[in-house]
Image: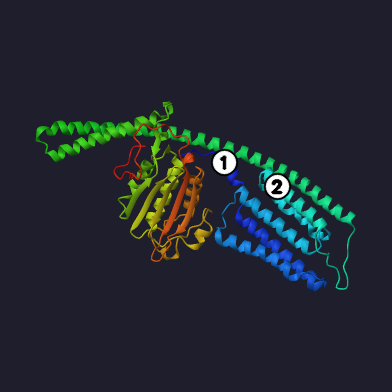
Amino acid sequence: MPDSDPSRLLRDARHLRLDTFVRLRWLAIAGQSAAVVGAQFGLGLSLPFGWCFLAIAASSWLNLGLRIRFPASYRLNDDAAALLLAFDIVQLAVLLFLTGGLQNPFSLLFLAPVLISATALPPERTLALGLLAVGLATLLALVHRPLPWFADGRIELPFLYVSGVWTAILLGTAFTGVYAWRVSEETRQLAQALAATELVLAREQHLSQLDGLAAAAAHELGTPLGTIMVVTKELVRQLGPSATPAVREDLDLLREQVDRCRGILGKLTSLGADGDGGGFLETVTLGQIVEELAAPQRALGVVLDVSGRGEGPEPACRRNPGVMYGLANILDNAIDFSESRVTLEARWTLERVSLEIRDDGPGFSSEVLLRAGEPYVTTRSPERRDDEAWNRGGLGLGLFIAKTLIERSGAQITLSNAAGPGNHGAVVRISWARHIFERGAAPRHSPELPRSAPLPTGDAAPI
């Protein structure tokens, strides 16, 4: 699995939350509605009231659709954010067309979407939005309905004044866009430098801790393992031919496991000297990853169905402990909340690699689905609050940590409940683009699996 890329993480972190767009648009809708109602009924101006509210309703419908379709924590990519800001510019242009064009003092609000874009989107998106705003402003300077005045007449401002407003919008768009982008870019560069420094320091700290723990474990465990080996050999010598086959088999197994422990300790103590990329950083297949996840769960009393098939050779990747921890955390959750069965399914094509974890429990609550990925969200389903799994004292950080670790590898995570009549339970889907999943993997020397080959279901392969 690919390692974390600090630049990519920061690029993803700067993506705006959809909830921010929705809240700002509700604020704009409230302001537009108040302005139209106040001008129509408060000042007695003659407005195309129905058409104005139709344009405002379009923004309301879009907000409601986005709120229903996506969770509050969803983060927009650059293209989606640019499209939403473009919609706001067009919707404002429609309102201005109905109420006097650039003669309307609210025409300066063209600057708001460009300013938001400059602080959060790449320069090319901001340039495109600025050109859209200036282009629509140019059109409104030439074509628009009359500026509403009093009931007994209307006013036409000189074209020189309209040209001045157009120039102000043009210069304001350019200046605020460049200024806001520059300030935001400096802030992002500083944050990126700090994040990269913290990441390097954290990795060095973890490596130092692991190195020290490995040396301490090898030192502390070496003596008792040696004693066990000596006692085992002495028992074999004392029993001799009189030992029953069962006892001799147990003693042989004990010696074998002691040798295995010594081998593990030898690997731990030699990690710092190995330069061949072995040990915990070796290349593993998708089947080995699935088996490593499933093996510890098979003795917990819950039926665990493991399956996998795909198109082309089985994908392989570089083992990523963070991703393994995140996947194990999600599988643990499924085991805890299941009634009797959990399904772990792996699929791959020439383009994508995916894992799906399903359980037959009560499923995710609406709060979890709405705020998926946020910290301190502890509810799965109110019906399970008296269960042991519910009362383990967690802080609601498990899903947040798991989701963050897995998404750092380039994966996409989707949380849902089982669909269809009679179906229930939670469904978690993790998907990678295949080239991202296999990034950094060493060439494989084992034979390729045939299409639709099942994943291994025996003992976990060594990783």
First of labels 2, 1 by sequence position: 1
The x and y percentages for residue 441 are 44, 34
Residue 394 vs residue 164: left or right?
A: left
How far apart are the alpha carbons under marks 2 and 1? 24 Å
Asked whether residue 317 appears in the rendered view, the answer is yes
Residue occupying image coordinates x 77% and y 64%: 98
- Which residue occupies 81% across, 71% down? 46
Q: Is residue 118 visible?
A: no
Across and down, in percent, residue 433 comes to 48, 43
Q: Residues within 10 Å of mark 2 (few under 14, many from 20)?
A: some
Toward the viewer: 206 or 323? 323
The residue at the point 58 percent across, 37 percent down is: 196
Percent coordinates x, y for residue 26 in the rendering: 67, 62
Q: Quadrant of the C terminus?
A: top left
The correct choice, above or below, for 373 with respect to 223 in the image is below
Name the amino acid, label 1: Arg
- Of labels 2 and 1, the one closer to you: 2
- Height in image: 42 above or below 423? below
Under mark 2, the amino acid is: Ala
338 above or below 216? below
Which colouring convention does the figure follow? rainbow
- Crowding around mark 1 (Cα neighbors within 10 Å: few <14, some 14 to 19, many 20+) is few
Q: Is residue 380 left or right of residue 167?
A: left
In this picture, residue 356 sits left or right of residue 12: left
Which residue is pictured at 37% across the width and 51% down the height? 344
Q: Secondary structure at mark 1?
A: helix
Compared to residue 207, the image places residue 326 above or below, namely below
Residue 268 or residue 308, whichever sits in front: 308
Which residue carries the number 2 mark? Answer: 128
Could you tell me which secondary element the residue under label 2 belongs to? Answer: helix
Q: Quadrant of residue 161?
A: bottom right
Which residue is tagged 1?
8
